[in-house]
């Protein structure tokens, strides 16, 4: 039995996935399995072997159809997972070696823990962290998570996953999934140290052509799902969560207007610039 299952959705990820995998293999905590869910038909284990990576802790599954989306891919990996705890890693991001060893004690105590996401340029230039960097861990709620403007990549007890990701969401699906994790765990423990490098690639789901339009459609769908009360929402926070999603939609529209006006900044660059302007 393995302690931690790491779930990785991969779609045409040949150029980035090896760095993500090597970040996992460099973890101080070694009791893990990495399940790669191929959503494009690529054999990522063959790519690993061709690059000298042979590790029995790495497995691969495939989605039922090419292009099923990140939710379906993560759910496919989740269905194959054996761990008591789960963690999410995108195929174009990189973990620092202490990620699992630092978060595991917190997740064992609280059920759900995350580190401080660090948005960085592909060449290594820094953009911003989700929270001020600090040493001491503290609890955050769903609204704090949403208002940070950054994705979160938690480590959590497997039973908190519920039915997994919503297959009908292909954008902001992580926001919804993390909100439901927090609803089930009551809070998420944040270790405000930057152990996840969230790499801002121009062709990523958040920054590629038309990304803001896909986000607009996703936020409208999430608001409709919230209105039907189909999501696990933290107690007493339904209206405030709805307002937070509406605010994210409005911010995305501002980003879209900037894109249409010829602004080539990534979403995180845009968000960081807006924060600086408000100080």
Image: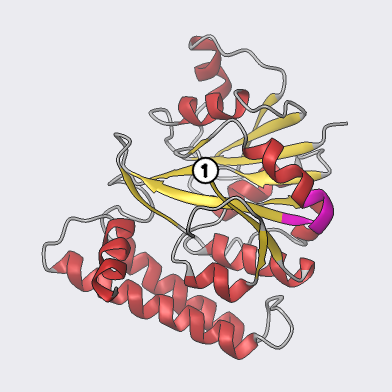
Residue 207: x percent and y percent?
31, 54
Residue 231 vs residue 143: left or right? right
Question: What is the quadrant of the N terminus in the image?
Answer: top right
Q: Which residue lies at the image location 46% right of the left edge and 60% below the top edge?
A: 150
Image quarter for residue 216?
bottom left
Q: Secondary structure at mark 1?
A: strand
The answer, for residue 69, to whether it is visible in the render is no
Residue at the front extreme of this rendering:
135
How are the colours assigned in the image? secondary structure
Viewer-nearest residue: 25 or 108 = 108
Residue 163: x percent and y percent?
75, 61
Q: How many marks?
A: 1
Q: Alpha-carbon neighbours of circle 1 within 10 Å: few (<14), some, or many (≥20)?
A: many
Residue at the right extreme of this rendering:
1
User: Which residue position is annotated with label 1?
Assistant: 196
Residue 83 vs residue 149: left or right? right
Give the answer, above or below, for where 276 lies relative to 95. below
The part of the chain drawn in magenta is 107-112
Image quarter for residue 49?
top right
Image quarter for residue 8?
top right
Query: What secondary structure characterizes most of the magenta part?
Result: helix
The answer, for residue 15, to whether it is visible in the render is yes
Q: Which residue lies at the image location 29% right of the left edge and 73% below the top edge?
A: 279
Residue at the left extreme of this rendering:
262
Give the answer, above or below, for where 34 lies relative to 214. above
Residue 215: x percent and y percent?
39, 67
Q: Which residue lies at the image location 34% right of the left edge and 72% below the top edge?
A: 252
Q: Which residue lies at the image location 56% right of the left edge and 72% below the top edge?
A: 144
Q: Is residue 41 magenta?
A: no
Residue 91: x percent and y percent?
49, 38
């Amino acid at each position: 039995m393995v302690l931690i299952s790491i779930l990785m959705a991969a779609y045409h990820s040949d150029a980035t996935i090896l760095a993500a995998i090597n970040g996992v293999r460099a973890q101080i905590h070694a009791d893990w399995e990495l399940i790669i869910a191929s959503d494009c038909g690529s054999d990522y284990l063959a790519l690993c072997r061709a690059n000298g990576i042979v590790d029995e802790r790495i497995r691969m599954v495939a989605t039922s159809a090419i292009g099923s989306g990140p939710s379906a891919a993560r759910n496919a990996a989740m269905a194959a997972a054996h761990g008591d705890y789960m963690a999410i890693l995108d195929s174009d991001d990189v973990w620092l070696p202490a990620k699992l060893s630092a978060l595991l004690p917190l997740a064992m105590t609280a059920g759900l823990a995350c580190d401080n996401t660090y948005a960085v340029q592909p060449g290594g230039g820094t953009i911003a962290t989700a929270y001020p960097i600090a040493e001491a861990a503290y609890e955050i709620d769903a609204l704090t998570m949403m208002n940070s403007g950054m994705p979160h990549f938690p480590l959590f007890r497997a039973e908190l996953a519920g039915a997994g990701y919503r297959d009908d969401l292909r954008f902001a699906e992580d926001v919804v999934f993390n909100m439901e994790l927090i609803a089930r765990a009551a809070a998420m423990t944040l270790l405000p140290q930057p152990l996840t490098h969230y790499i801002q690639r121009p062709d990523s789901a958040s920054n590629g052509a038309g990304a803001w339009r896909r986000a607009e459609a996703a936020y409208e769908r999430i608001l409709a799902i919230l209105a039907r009360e189909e999501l696990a929402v933290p107690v007493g926070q339904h209206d405030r969560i709805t307002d937070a999603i509406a605010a994210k939609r409005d911010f995305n529209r501002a980003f879209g207007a900037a894109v249409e006006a010829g602004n080539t900044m990534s979403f995180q660059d845009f968000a960081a610039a807006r924060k600086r302007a408000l100080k």
